[in-house]
Amino acid sequence: ARDDYVWWNYDPDCELQQGGWWVCPRQSRRTGNRRNVASFSMDYDPSITSAFESESVCGNTAWQPPPCPHHGTVAHLGQDPANGIPISSNPTVTGPTGGLGWVFVWDKGTPKSITFEFSQIDELDEVILALPYRAGTTFSIRWDAAHWCNTDWG
């Protein structure tokens, strides 16, 4: 797989295809969980966000991409973080859903503030996020729905 990451090889039924792509069944034969894909962006450091938006660090628009600093790793719960995918200055994470937890490990410790935005998660899926903090840490968790969401829609 890409750069030896096994992020997409999350189930024994996954098969490595020519070209380094993992193909996995939509439903786990082992657990019965439905599998899908979710994606979201993170904003956790204004200087990183500014560098990304100015294209002075990695992105998808440059012909010769600038450097892509490593800020941490995202791995499936229970897997070695070395087998996860990097958290870079491009703050978007995309991965499999369906009972797989994602643990975020930052190189300089978990940020004090993180905003998850631009989420693309199927309404039938769940995404479990694990963020390591020191014991005794207090939290203020807030959720904002898009302006077009309405609880009356069911």
Image (spheres, rainbow, N blue to C red):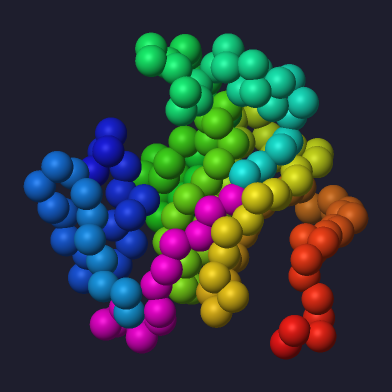
Any magenta on residue 147?
Answer: no
Whole-percent x, y for residue 9 in the image: 29, 57
Q: Which residues are magenta?
A: 28-40
In the image, taking residue 68 as reference, residue 35 lies left or right, namely left
Whole-percent x, y for residue 145 in the image: 79, 63
**Figure check: 90 above or below 76:** above
Q: Nearer the viewer, residue 73 or 118?
A: 118
In the image, taking residue 124 as reference, residue 95 lies left or right, namely left
Residue at 44% over, 62% down: 37
Residue at 18% over, 44% down: 20
Q: Nearer the viewer, residue 77 or 119?
A: 119
Task: Please indicate, yes or no, whether residue 148 appears anywhere in the rendered image.
Answer: yes
Whole-percent x, y for residue 135 in the image: 79, 53
Task: Please indicate, yes or no, whether residue 12 appears anywhere in the rendered image.
Answer: no
Residue at 47% over, 67% down: 97
Q: Quadrant of the N terminus?
A: top left
